[in-house]
Image (cartoon, helix red, strand yellow):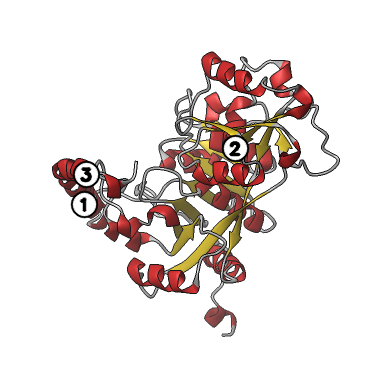
Amino acid sequence: MNEHNTPHLHNSLRPLALIYKAVVQLRNRLFDWKILPSETYDIPVISVGNITVGGTGKTPHTEYLIHLLAPHYHIALLSRGYKRKSRGFVIAEATSTSAQIGDEPLQIKRKFPHITVAVDADRRRGIRQIRKHFPETNLILLDDAFQHRYVTPSTSILLTDINRLIYEDKMLPAGRLREPLSGKSRANIVIVTKCPDDIKPIDFRIITKHLQLYPYQRLYFTTFRYGALTPVFPGTCTIPQDTPVDISLYKNVVAVSGIASPHTFIHHIHTLCPAAQSLTFADHHDFTARDITRIKKLSTQASPDDTLVIVTEKDAARLMHNRHIDTPLKQRMLYLPLQVTFLQNGGPAFDAQILDEAKKNSPSYIPQSRRTK
């Protein structure tokens, strides 16, 4: 639903939005005044989050950070594990399911089995448990923790989707903002995500102007690149993998998504195969037997050799343990991985800033001024 097409709806919700805004502002002030406690740590803690509901690309950006930092640190990722069935602190294992730890932590654990991945809605408890069980940990990544002010990260990264920039949005429930725009002041880094490849130089300048960042904040722009199609069920898939899969060669392509902002994924599939069919579900959707039946119905409209079922990487983390998926569907199901690319040659500057911030917040760091004395 586009807010610009429904002004009457948003105007009717404005009183509720004002009440919600007042409550959030009071909560933030209680933290600012030290009435509510916030913990700091003697190792780098890097938070990736947003101030809106809906997808801004947190998981791909977190994966980018892991690629960057893993060669230098013993990383632990801590997430709340949204929509998991378990409670409390849970350590991700090789055999974990999305029901136990959530789809995004599972996706990251599968991709980076060498790092510690844990979930806990109480981030302070989660950090304590990680350091107790994995004392070698010397850097923690917090996923989706911008509003979790009981922890003060050493570096805070705020994401905003270019398709719904935070300065154009409204407070819940009239819009998608979880806190007032002033909350962006807590970020060290702001990243405008999901930028189109053809974004114009004037757009960079307009967005930069409207964000009104402080001198201590750095702004970056990123876009997504899709990787090669990968089997959701590697041992069962019958689609040849010796060369990249060409979607355009298949007569029946079904794109399935259960993410907050599926338009980029679906647009990409339709670019490669205009006749592709699509099924969209709510974010973090738990696929039922009925849902799988719908997918199977669409995927059997052509011979198996002419059929592809393509899902997002996050959906693959949930579908890989779905007991309703039979062998014929497993044989034709692939997922499309996402990778972050920085625009305006911002990648080297971002990498250098993150590595420098991590080093400065490490216990063994010695400032340059003290080294030369």
Q: In which quarter of the image is residue 231?
A: top right
Q: Quadrant of residue 230?
A: top right
Compared with 9, 96 (above or below) is above
Left-right relation of 307 to 153: right
Q: Where does the N terminus fall, quadrant-wise? A: top left
Spot occupied by residue 233 in the image (x, y as percentages of width and height): 72, 27
Marks 3 and 1 close (CB-CB < 8 Å): no
Spot occupied by residue 136 in the image (x, y as percentages of width and height): 63, 48
Residue plotted at (36% across, 69% down): 213
For the residues labelled 3 and 2, the Cα–Cα distance comes to 31 Å
Q: Where does the C terminus fall, quadrant-wise? A: bottom right
Left-right relation of 248 to 121: right
- What residue did someone put label 3 on? 10
Spot occupied by residue 49 in the image (x, y as percentages of width and height): 44, 50
Compared with 17, 290 (above or below) is above
Residue plotted at (86% across, 40% down): 242
Q: Residue 237 carries which label?
A: none
Q: Residue type at mark 1?
A: Gln
Residue 134 in view here: no
Left-right relation of 105 to 120: right
Is label 1 or label 2 in front? 2
* Mark closer to the chain start, 3 or 1: 3
Q: Residue 25 carries which label?
A: 1
- What residue did someone put label 2 on? 312
Is label 3 or label 1 in front? 3
Q: Residue type at mark 2?
A: Thr
What secondary structure is found at the residue carrying circle 1? helix
For the residues labelled 1 and 2, the Cα–Cα distance comes to 36 Å
Residue farthest to the bottom, as pictured? 373
Q: Which of 211 and 363 lies nearest the eye of the viewer?
A: 211
Q: Residues within 10 Å of mark 1 (few under 14, many from 20)?
A: some
